[in-house]
Image (cartoon, rainbow, N blue to C red):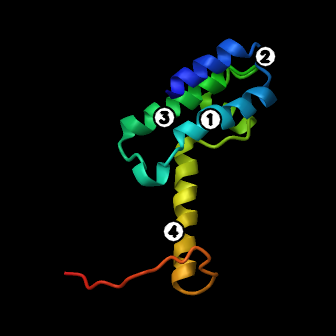
Amino acid sequence: KVRQNVAWVFSVFQTRSPVIMLTLYKSMVRSLLEYCCPLWHPSKICDIQELESVQKAFTARITGMRDLHYWDRLQRLSLMSLQRRRERFNVYSTSYMWKILHHHTSNDINLQFFSRPRF
């Protein structure tokens, strides 16, 4: 599905301008790659590489990026790797849960924590 969206973007839009391509990437491609990622957070290297390959291929087709190494493209386009984005989200959500648990922030979503003995 994601690769179909990538192909559609490149077939419909003739421009390869970084601004336009990044907007399309973030709205039509990355959103699918990151859909429900906290629930299915990939841990196998092959799964991580498969997801990352979509971003790698997309960024290579943006004007002026083809000859750059993947990490240089990310830096120039002000993007993070998808793995890094997932890790940041996990850290953020874990710290937010800790703050709710210890009453350092309001619990607007009414999360309830239960203590269970370990066996």
Left or right for 87, reference 75: left
- Disc on the earlier residue, 4 or 3: 3
- Please state which of the two labelled residues, at mark 1 or mark 2, is closer to the viewer: 2
Which badge, 3 or 1, is on the more N-terminal residue?
Answer: 3
Which of the marked residues, 1 or 2, is nearer the chain's N terminus?
Answer: 2
State the SS at label 4.
helix
Residue at 51% in and 34% down: 52
Q: Please provide percent x and percent y for residue 40.
A: 40, 49
- Any mark on residue 71, and which? 1
Badge 3 marks a residue whose secondary structure is: helix
Task: Choose top left, top right, bottom left or bottom right for residue 119.
Answer: bottom left
Give amino acid for label 4.
Thr
**Furthest-left residue in this view:** 119
Which circle marks residue 51 in the picture? Answer: 3
Pointers 3 and 1 in contact (C-beta within 8 Å)? no
Of callouts 4 and 2, the N-terminal one: 2
Residue bearing mark 2: 15
| Residue at which label 4 appears | 94
